[in-house]
Amino acid sequence: MTETNDLKNQNKKRKSLIYKIALTGVMTALAEVLMMLEIPLPLMPGFLKYDFSDIPALFAGFACGPVAGIIVEFLKNLIHMPFTGTQYIGEAANFISGSIFVFVGAFTYAKMRNKKGVALSLVLGTVALTIATSFVNYFFSLPLYESVMGFPMPAIIDMCDKANTFCHISSKLDVILMTFVPFNIFKGITISIVAFLCYLPLHGILSKKVD
């Protein structure tokens, strides 16, 4: 009897692992397709592009846990590297910001696997995304653009200032507060709305915990 139970548990774990790998692969492919469809936004400088590629990673995190979501974020950026014009700085920043959003969202959802849980996870993910990316861009991305790509800070400030018709941008801190913060708030909110609408028909599948 014990051997039979052990065999059933092993088969269950094997099926669960196969499911996680398959789902992660499908979500990675979808995320990369969405990442290729990135678009510029009004009032934002040309180097900031918007896409919905965090949604598949988020759903992988909902279904299989935060680690699966982070793996999707890593793989989509790895696949995207041959198409980059940022010497991988943009992909590194995208991975960090996306992973923070997905980890917070998936971790929160794991504690409350229902509609309220997904709504809360998206709100907290957006807050974490906005705060964390402010520090990432200030201390990581912008210095690398300047040192690696030879893109001087005054030029970045000028681009942000010309794109923003509401505020005058004259410093690196202004770039963060008046460009990156609004961009990431907008990104987090719009991705959250689309993710929640997509979640509703998938609620029955995603609410089941995959062991």
Image (cartoon, rainbow, N blue to C red):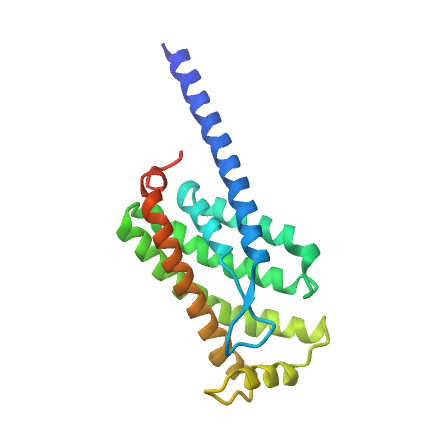
User: Picture quarter containing residue 149?
Assistant: bottom right
Q: Residue 79's x, y, as percent?
A: 64, 50
The residue closer to the viewer here, 206 or 111, is 206
User: Picture quarter containing residue 159?
Assistant: bottom right
Residue at the image point whose x is 38% and y is 16% from the top? 5
46 versus 96 height, above or below:
below
Quarter that holds the C terminus: top left
The residue closer to the viewer here, 209 or 162, is 162
Q: Residue 203's x, y, as percent?
A: 32, 43
Total marks in image: 0
Residue at the image point whose x is 46% and y is 74% from the top? 181
210 versus 53 height, above or below:
above
Residue at the image point whose x is 42% and y is 60% from the top? 191
Quarter that holds the N terminus: top left
* Residue reaching furthest to the top: 1
User: Picture quarter containing residue 84?
Assistant: bottom right
Q: Residue 64's x, y, as percent?
A: 43, 41
66 versus 97 height, above or below:
above
Residue at the image point whose x is 33% and y is 52% from the top? 118
Q: Residue 57's x, y, as percent?
A: 48, 50
Taking the image as shown, residue 208 lies to the left or right of residue 97, namely: left
Taking the image as shown, residue 6 lies to the left or right of residue 37, namely: left
